[in-house]
Amino acid sequence: MPAVDLYFDFRSPFAYFTAHRIRSGQVAPAVPIEWRWHPVSIDVLLNLQANKSDWATYSDPLAPPKRKHFLKDVVRSAEYYRVPIRPPNPPRSNSIPALCASLALAKGGTEHDRFRNAIFDALWQQQRDIGDRAVLYACASAANVPTAIIDAAFASGAKELLATATRAAYENDIFGVPSFVSAGEIYFGNDRLDMLVSRLARASAT
C-alpha cells in the first residue's frame, strides 16, 4: 500500500477541501492509500520563507488583487468539489491549539481522524471559533478524545513542539498546505490531489 504524507493547517480552506474529499470518498484511488496526516502552522511556514522568527506578528502575504482572487477561488472550488463551506467566524481563528492537539494525536489512527474532521467541520461548516477552548472540548468529546489533550494543547511548550514540527517540514521542502509527499516527490495544493492519485494508480498497474 503506497503511503502519502499529508501536511495541513486547519485554517487553510484548501486543506479542508482535501480532507473532506478524502473522507467523503470523492477521491477514489484504484489502490488503497495510507494517508499520514501532519499538522503544521502555515504562519510558521510563511515566516520561515520571509526569514522571520517562528511566531513573528502576522502580516498578509497576499497582495490585494491576489487576496481577492483567493477568496473567489475558495467559493468556486467549493462549488466544483461539492464541499459544504461557510465563511469562518471569526474570519481568522487561532488554529494553534487545535494543531497542537492534533500533533499529539497524529499517530492515533481513527481517533485522530475523528478529531481532525470535527475541527475542520467546526471551522468551515459550523462557523465556530476553533481557538476557543470550549469549542475544542466539544470537538474532542465528539471524537471520543480525552479533554486532557486539549488542556495540554494550551500548556506551555505545546506551541514550540508545533513550531519544531513545522520547521522540520520546511527543512524537507514543505512550504505550504495542503502538501502531499509520495516517494520523495512533493505535490502542493488540493488541485494536485487528483494528479497524485492518478499517478499512484498508474504505478500500481505496472
Image (spheres, helix red, strand yellow):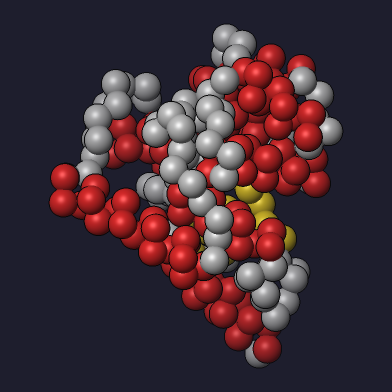
Locate the N terminus and report the quarter of the image it occupies: bottom right
Q: Residue 172: tell me if it is visible.
A: no
Q: Is residue 1 above or below residue 69?
A: below
| Total numbered labels placed on residues in the image | 0
Residue situated furthest bottom in the rendering: 206
Q: Position of residue 52 (x, y in %)?
A: 27, 27
Q: Position of residue 201 (x, y in %)?
A: 64, 81
Residue at 46% over, 32% down: 89
Residue at 57% over, 45% down: 125
Q: Is residue 204 above or below residue 184?
A: below
Q: Position of residue 132 (x, y in %)?
A: 57, 20
Q: Position of residue 167 (x, y in %)?
A: 45, 34
Residue at 58% over, 39% down: 126
Residue sitting nearer the eye, 15 or 168: 15
Residue sitting nearer the eye, 90 or 42: 90
Residue sitting nearer the eye, 151 or 125: 125
19 with respect to 112 (left or right): left
Q: Is residue 17 above or below residue 40?
A: below
Residue 49 occupies which quadrant of the picture? top left
Residue at 60% over, 54% down: 19
Residue sitting nearer the eye, 129 or 158: 129
64 with respect to 104 (left or right): left
Q: Residue 79: tell me if it is visible.
A: yes
Locate the C terminus and report the quarter of the image it occupies: bottom right
Residue situated furthest top in the rendering: 156
